[in-house]
Amino acid sequence: MPSIDTNTLAATIPTSLSGAAIDVLYKLALHGGQNDGDLPSKSGMTELIQRGLAYKDYAESITGHSNFITEAGAAYYKHLINQKIAAQLS
């Protein structure tokens, strides 16, 4: 699978993410798959799904996790971290 360029990815997301979506993105990126009840925001998860940054897979619910980050979501998370680091260095 080809890697996703984070600059290209950032350009494809039309507006910035809401705070709720960023909270969910961080949780999924740092802690992996999550139950619905373990998400910081249901509306944030819905926003990520609509933008292709996360998905639900109820077939995995046997393991207790049904919410996951996509490859694009992981790349966007890295982009957000790089922006945060750059802002701190400037």
Image (spheres, helix red, strand yellow):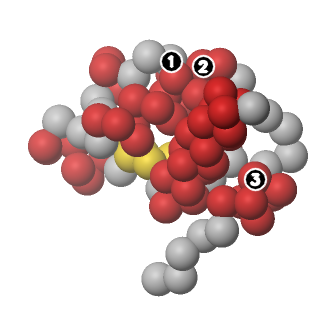
Q: Nearer the viewer, residue 30 or 35?
A: 30
Residue 64 is situated, as x and y percent measured from the top left of the image, at 17, 36
SS at badge 1: loop
Please tell me whether residue 76 is drawn above or below residue 21 in the rendered image: below
Instruction: Name the mark nearer the viewer: 1 or 3.
Output: 3
Residue 15 is situated, as x and y percent measured from the top left of the image, at 85, 38
Decide: few, some or many residues near mark 1? Use Cα within 10 Å; few <14, some 14-19, many ≥20: some
Query: Does the residue at mark 2 contact the one at mark 1 (Cβ under 8 Å)?
Result: yes
Q: Residue furthest left?
A: 63
Query: Separation of disc 2 and disc 3 at Cα?
Result: 18 Å
Q: Name the residue carrying label 1.
A: 41
Q: Residue furthest front?
A: 90
Q: Nearer the viewer, residue 69 or 77?
A: 77
Of the two numbered discs 1 and 3 on the same chain, state the one appearing first in sequence.
3
Residue 16 is situated, as x and y percent measured from the top left of the image, at 79, 34
Residue ID at (30%, 42%): 32
Please tell me whether residue 68 is drawn above or below residue 84 in the rendered image: below
Where, by quadrant of the figure, is residue 67 drawn?
Answer: top left
SS at badge 3: helix
Of the two numbered discs 2 and 1 on the same chain, state the one appearing first in sequence.
2
Residue ID at (49%, 61%): 71
Query: Separation of disc 1 and disc 3 at Cα?
Result: 22 Å
Q: Name the residue carrying label 3.
A: 10
Q: Is residue 17 left or right of residue 12?
A: left
Query: Separation of disc 2 and disc 1 at Cα?
Result: 6 Å
Instruction: Name the mark nearer the viewer: 2 or 3.
Output: 3
Q: Name the residue carrying label 2.
A: 20
Disc 1 residue type? Ser
